[in-house]
Amino acid sequence: MSLYDGVDLRLNVPHSARMYDYYLGGFTNFAADREAAGHALAIAPWLRETARANRSFMHRSTRALARAGIDQFLDIGTGIPTSPNLHEIAQSVRPTARIVYADNDPIVLTHAQALLTGTPEGRTAYVEADVTDPDGLLAAPGLRETIDLARPVALSLNALLHFVPDARGAHELVERLKSVLAPGSALVMTHVTPDFAPEEIRRITGIYQAAGTAAQARTRAEFVRFFDGWTLLEPGVVPTPHWRPVPDEPAVSDSDASAYAGVALRP
């Protein structure tokens, strides 16, 4: 029996999660994904660096928050598992950490078991839910059984909201998710921006839209709005490679990153 039996993956249609997997050098992608990703790479060969810089930010921000005492994480828009995953980073610092992954993507569902192998002391869970339905997501079976929303939670929305245009209420749904989190919680986000390579990002956005994936790059000012009312941690909103870089990481230019990152705490 195949891992994909009974799951409609629409393998003839490019998919953003599989394209991202391809940029990262993964193997969970198919001809349509590689073709669309190839068109994007022809416009911007640095997209592989963009994906790696985003992944590296996730590692650094998760580690920083775990060291600061947060032991609950809600990762929405999980994507295809690529080790080390968020729970591996968090539980390497805090073995008792609890992590909930959420995604509405059947390709992620087929690989969800890889996200559930955490430490014996901690707990990981996967829920099938859509960020554009925040109330449904918050009510998803398994979420509240795993994390306690009365205690601080790190809400991770990495490389997700550029697939939710303004017409679908991106800022409003983030505010809804923020509203249920306890003081001391964190909002962790990355987002593609046109600020450094506007023509390339415009054309890449068109490739995703042509493949049936809604997409909207946002300026720094538009991205900063997601953190309204919360306190940004140093160094604030910056290109992904500049958020608390570590010495052994390869340098990535702002234009190659073409994404902003930020972490903020609820007062």
Image (cartoon, rainbow, N blue to C red):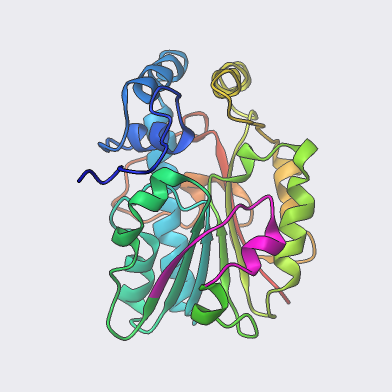
Answer left or right for 29 relative to 14.
Answer: left
Question: Which residues, given as a range, are shown in magenta?
Answer: 124-141
Answer left or right for 14 relative to 158.
Answer: left
In this rendered view, identify the residue nearer to me: 209 or 256. Answer: 209
Residue 78 on image: x %, y %: 46, 53
Decide if residue 92 is in sight here.
yes
Decide if residue 233 is in sight here.
no
Does residue 195 belong to the magenta stretch?
A: no
Q: Residue furthest left?
A: 1
Residue sitting at x 76%, y 50%: 171
Residue 128 on image: x %, y %: 51, 57
Q: Residue 230 sits in which quadrant?
A: bottom right
Q: Is residue 211 above or below residue 143?
A: above
Q: Is residue 12 above or below residue 147?
A: above
Does residue 134 belong to the magenta stretch?
A: yes
Residue 35 on image: x %, y %: 37, 17
Residue 163 on image: x %, y %: 61, 38
Image quadrant containing the C terminus: bottom right
In this rendered view, identify the residue nearer to me: 107 or 254. Answer: 107
Residue sitting at x 32%, y 27%: 30
Residue sitting at x 70%, y 45%: 223
Q: Is residue 222 above or below residue 153?
A: above
